[in-house]
Amino acid sequence: MERNIFPHPAVAGELKKRFLEARLHLDGREPARSRNNELRKTLAGTLARPTYVIMDPKTRKVLRKHEGWLPDPQGFLNFLKGS
């Protein structure tokens, strides 16, 4: 995703225009890994990897969520746009 999907011009433009990105990395050392796993479970309601979540920053309500890989830029763009 970091190499092929996020940098794609249409995806990068949509991310920059409408979103604030936050990432939880789960490959670190303890205790950070455990804290990030708990935060992912709390915010996303899943332990699936990868999980993409769009939430309202004021209410923390999850607006959209996708578990698993999205194989192409258009698929991820559709997720971002809710289509």
Image (tube, grey):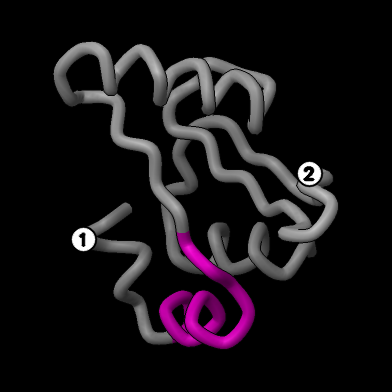
Question: Which region shows up in magenta?
Answer: 10-21
Whether 83 is drawn above or below 40: the answer is below
Residue 53 at x, y percent in the picture = 63, 45
Q: Nearer the viewer, residue 73 or 38?
A: 38
Q: Residue at x 15, y 18 (%)?
A: 29
Dot 2: element:
strand
Q: Nearer the viewer, residue 63 or 10?
A: 63
Q: How many numbered marks, from 0 up? A: 2
Q: Nearer the viewer, residue 83 or 28?
A: 28
Question: Taking 75 as reference, is 59 left or right?
Answer: right
Residue 19 drawn in magenta: yes
Q: Nearer the viewer, residue 49 or 74?
A: 49
Q: Residue at x 45, y 54 (%)?
A: 22
Give residue 25's quadrant in the image.
top left
Whether 44 is drawn above or below 54: the answer is above
Disc 1 to disc 2, C-alpha distance: 26 Å
Quadrant of the snapshot with the C terminus: bottom right
Residue 72 at x, y percent in the picture = 43, 58
Residue 3 at x, y percent in the picture = 21, 60
Question: Taking 51 as reference, is 35 left or right?
Answer: left
Residue at image mark 1:
3
Residue 26 at x, y percent in the picture = 29, 25
Predominant SS along the magenta part: helix
Residue at image mark 2:
62
Amino acid marked by disc 2:
Val
